[in-house]
Image (cartoon, helix red, strand yellow):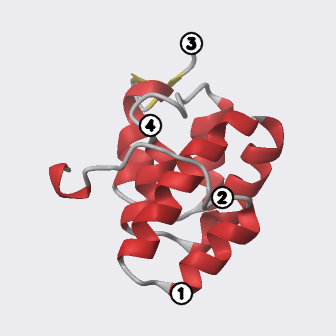
Amino acid sequence: MHRLFGKSANELNCYALRLRINHPGIVRLFIEHGADLKTGSPLAWAFGKKPRRSLVGILKDLMKKDPTLLVQATQALNERIRAQDEKWISLLLWIGADPRLSVDDLKMDDR
């Protein structure tokens, strides 16, 4: 596993996505170095809690490569629906989130 800043990409993954780093190049760097995009639903958190427009392209590309990320996109969609955020509801639908898919809720207040 590659190391960045003395830590593995997986260790820094939560930091990068949950603390809302919004520079696509930095996020792509984490992904290229093996960041875990599944454990803990980091993409759902990134787009569900405080979405960044600069990362939309990354999520769309990732969903083309890995359709299982549809679950996280849909979790983020559910959070944006609860927040009544029409802009992000539209963007997440465009990315490919499925409003008919049954997914677990994110407990947004826990983090």
Query: Is tag 3's residue or tag 4's residue first in the polypeptide sequence?
Result: 3
Rendered view: 14 above or below 85 = above
Q: Which mark is residue 86?
A: 1
Query: Is tag 4's residue or tag 2's residue first in the polypeptide sequence?
Result: 4
Amino acid type indicated by mark 1: Glu
Image quarter of residue 40? top left
Q: Position of residue 87 (x, y in %)?
A: 57, 86
- Label 1 CA crowd tier, 10 Å (few <14, some 14–19, many 20+): few
Q: Position of residue 16 (x, y in %)?
A: 43, 48
Q: Which residue lies under the disc numbered 3?
A: 1
Image quarter of residue 84? bottom left
Query: Is tag 1's residue or tag 2's residue first in the polypeptide sequence?
Result: 1
Q: Position of residue 2 (x, y in %)?
A: 57, 18
Secondary-structure class at tag 2? loop
- Label 2 CA crowd tier, 10 Å (few <14, some 14–19, many 20+): many
Residue 9 lies left or right of residue 32; in this view the side is left
Q: Which residue lies under the disc numbered 2?
A: 97
Q: Nearer the viewer, mark 1 or mark 4?
A: 1
Rendered view: 26 above or below 5 = below
Amino acid type indicated by mark 3: Met
Q: Which residue lies under the disc numbered 4?
A: 13
In 3D space, how far apart are the residues under numbered discs 1 and 3 (Cα atoms)?
A: 39 Å
Which residue corresponds to the image point at 52% horizontal and 64% vertical from the top-left? 77
Q: Nearer the viewer, mark 1 or mark 3?
A: 1
Along the viewing direction, whichever of 79 and 17 lies nearer the viewer? 79
